[in-house]
Image (cartoon, grey):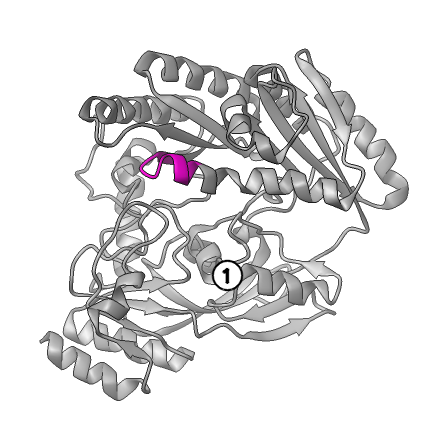
Amino acid sequence: MQSDFINHLETLLAAGQLLTDPADCVAYGYDNSTLQGRPLAVALPEDHQQVVAIVKACRTYGISLLARGQGTGTTGATVPIDDHSLVLSMQRMDRIVELNRDNRLMVVEPGVTNKAVQDAAATEGFFWPPDPTSASVCTVGGNLAYNSAGPRAVKYGTPRENTLALKAVTGAGETLHTGVRTTKGVVGYDLTRLLIGSEGTLAIITEATLKLTPVQPAKRTLRAIYKDVYSAACAVSSIMAQPVIPCALEFMDGNAINMVRDLQPGLPETAGALLMIEVDGIESQLGDMVAHVVDAASVTGLLDIQQAQSQQEIAALWETRKALSPALRRVAPKKINEDVVVPVSCMPELVNQLARLADRHKIKIINFGHAGNGNLHVNLLYDPDDPAQQRRAQACLEEVFNAVLEMGGTISGEHGIGLVKRDWVSKELDPISLNLMHAIKHQFDPDGILNPGKTLPDIETRIGS
């Protein structure tokens, strides 16, 4: 049956569009998590109709299908869970179809990188707000699949708020058009927002109409240093409670600072936490706007707050922030990396709770993230070769999730669910919601071929209950 399937794919695709040699396929079997699988084959379509044909072939032969961008995700959402799955790499569908200045939109294929979108938009004075740390290599299709946002989400929103329409292929091989080309539209259900964040389990996106935002003419970047994480968390709540919304508000705790201290010479040894704050707007207004933010950030525990004076200083600050994930990966390749979110007012409570959990379970925790959204990347460092440490880390993680949910938060902000968090979803969603979501999955994908086993747990799965 599998050989018949491969033979059929060869009739649909040109030379070089189908990889079947295990040596060629291995790079498509893992992502930025620690998980790895072995795909049956890899297809590299070049247009929408090829995607339709591939989906129909998979349905006919009962082959699982996983859409994939550049594999920068951290939850195993693009990792095959068996050896009879076809990986659909969207890397060749990387065209910018339309850049419409008058209507502030851009139409793109899913394989185009976030950076390519930003560069093209910048030529007309616009940008697309989502800006994940991996923006230079990650694809728009991946951004949409995970609803990945980045620092600018605090002011400008996530992909869900910045995508007007989609073209996609359902698990039945049907072409679906969602959304509008206008900034208003309420006809029918909002399928655009439903597909965004669904990790390729409902349909495969082949084209997206992105809503562009004008670049503000001026920007200021500040660095605030605090004696401890509690003080910084209080500052975040204070900043977000006043009228001037920063376009970025990033948080690093003392452990994170020590990881990248060599990139920021001059940081005091007593620095327990750091905030990076950016404010954008009209040049004539920025002075007053920055003053408001500085006043709000000046809580008890502030050690120093300074404005970057040059593009070089601004670049150094962002280099520090973006160096964290790679540095942690080198030090602890098997670390647990979670991106929990709580209401901003709960940030002080969350960081205190994380400190208590680290002490109780004897696990080192490093926290950084998008503080203006209450979105913290909580990194639990442990030795995977030490069973006792591994058990403590898992027990600590469960308490982290429980604490987040008790504060009215969520267990994932932008990293998605995939395989890594799938079995924890039932801690957050009630059985009625899960039943409805499974019914929606069946409606879009009647044979269950699209990324099976990801995102939603089985109905009966009840972790921690």
> At numbered mark 1, what does the secondary structure look like: helix, strand or loop?
helix
Left or right: 257 with respect to 465? Answer: right
Residue 97 quadrant: bottom right
On whether residue 97 falls in the magenta region, the answer is no
Is 76 above or below relative to 5? Answer: above
What residue is at 59 percent from the left and 46 percent from the top? 157
Left or right: 65 with respect to 188? Answer: left
Is 376 above or below relative to 395? Answer: below
What residue is at 24 percent from the left and 85 percent from the top? 10
How many numbered marks have been drawn onto this rendered protein structure? 1
Comparing 421 with 80, the one in front is 80
Three-letter residue code for mark 1: Val
Image quarter (top left, top right, bottom left or bottom right) of the N terminus: bottom left
Residue 263 image point, x, y percent: 61, 36
Residue 305 at least partly seen: yes
Residue 464 image point, x, y percent: 22, 26
Comparing 204 with 190, the one in front is 204
Residue assigned mark 1? 140
Q: Residues within 10 Å of mark 1 (few under 14, many from 20)?
A: many
Residue 236 image point, x, y percent: 63, 25
Which residues are the magenta region? 328-337
What residue is at 66 percent from the left and 38 percent from the top? 317
Image quarter (top left, top right, bottom left or bottom right) of the C terminus: top left
